[in-house]
Image: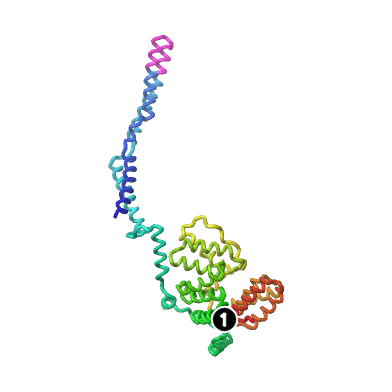
Amino acid sequence: MTFWVLIFLVALLIAAFLSYTLLRNRRSDEPAAAYDLRVYREQLASVDRDLTRGVIGEADADRVRTEISRRILAADAQMKQEGRSGGPARSVSVVAIACLALVLIGGATAMYHRMGAVGLPDMPLAARVEMAKEVRANRPSQAAAEELVTPPVPRQLEDSYANLLKQLRETVAARPDDLQGHMLLAQHETNAGNFMAGYTAQKNVVELSGEAVTADAYSDLAEMMILAAGGYVSPEAEQALDQALKRDPRHGPARYYWGQMLAQVGRPDIAYRVWVETVQDAPPGAPWADAIRRQIDELAFRAGVFNAPNLSGATGQPGPSQGEVAAAAELTPEERQEMIQGMVNQLSDRLATEGGSPEEWARLIAALGVMGQAQRAIDIRDEAMTVFAGDDAALEMIDAAALQAGIAQ
């Protein structure tokens, strides 16, 4: 209630100030014509004095009196005109004041109802931080989130790839202690859109790895759980991210999802700092850096940051234009698959004839793995290993792409 009284009093004070300006008598100031009349009358008196002293003749005195009289008549007419247009009528001013007060008071109230939070108590920083802690501690579990999410539409797989995936499931079921088998199963289940099955297999990867489990393994587990929950970072996914960051505090994908979690629980200020550092540390073409750049402006606004650094650097990987994305959205699944195949073939032909960066070779290998063209992916991997022989960083990138494609040796 105090807030509304304060708003009303402020609006009323402004209206009163403007009303005083409208109602005050602006005609109290002397018009310019009144000053002219005094001057002309003084000139008439001086003419009589000059005539008495003999300074001027009678004929000159009459001529000057006539000219001054003409000017006096003109000044008097001007004063009468100013008197008639000295301002609006009082009734008009009163109506204007009433409308002004209505606009100020009513408009302020309507704007707050539309843009404000009626009935919401003050939210100091300490209260918001405490609320974020409660949200983080009491948010839904992974299972609860999966129940609320619309299940993803299964991807259309080629028959050969579907059969290989079925055989892989059977092989892993028969050999539950096969670490490599679980790694392949987790990757291919995720590629096929079976995110729950993917993170179930990835949990087995973490367990079978024992003390040698890597930050990548935990980060992949968290990512699969987040995909299964429709982008929501559950407490279970947070635990996996925490384990990944304990093993590698600069792990890019884990830091990306960690920032996403912080934004979801009401701490966009911390999330913004995490994302900025992640982008600044990211290698060229890192997919998590591209994802951050697409969302950083909105997060900066939520965090109250208006002097954000420029993070829109080159990603290192050319992407489709907006027109190409819009055209792809209108294609049928078969046409879209054909378009993707054409893009992959174009990239493959260019790398074979002109060469390219390790990122492009890795992207081609990963794409072929997702499309189920395992043998072709193996051939490209072998060729890339030859091209980048002796370049440890490039070979590591190629190995990572091969693992993603499910063709790791």
Q: Position of residue 76 (x, y in %)?
A: 35, 27
Residue 47 part of the magenta-drawn span:
yes
Q: Nearer the viewer, residue 175 or 405?
A: 175
Quadrant where the image shows the C terminus: bottom right
Secondary structure mostly seen in the magenta stretch: helix
Q: Position of residue 13 (x, y in %)?
A: 32, 45
Q: Position of residue 41 (x, y in %)?
A: 37, 20
Give the left or right position of residue 194, taking residue 123 as reference: right
Residue drawn 41% across the image and 15% down it: 61
Residue drawn 64% across the image and 83% down it: 375
- The secondary element bearing badge 1 is classed as helix
Q: Position of residue 54 (x, y in %)?
A: 42, 9
**Total number of numbered labels?**
1
Q: Nearer the viewer, residue 39 or 265?
A: 265
The kind of residue on which mark 1 rests is Met
Q: Nearer the viewer, residue 225 or 113?
A: 225
Q: Write the start and end of the magenta stretch as one range.
A: 45-64
Residue 16 part of the magenta-drawn span:
no
Give the left or right position of residue 55, taking residue 79 as reference: right
Q: Which residue is mark 1?
A: 183
The relative height of residue 14 versus residue 260 in the rendered view (above or below) is above
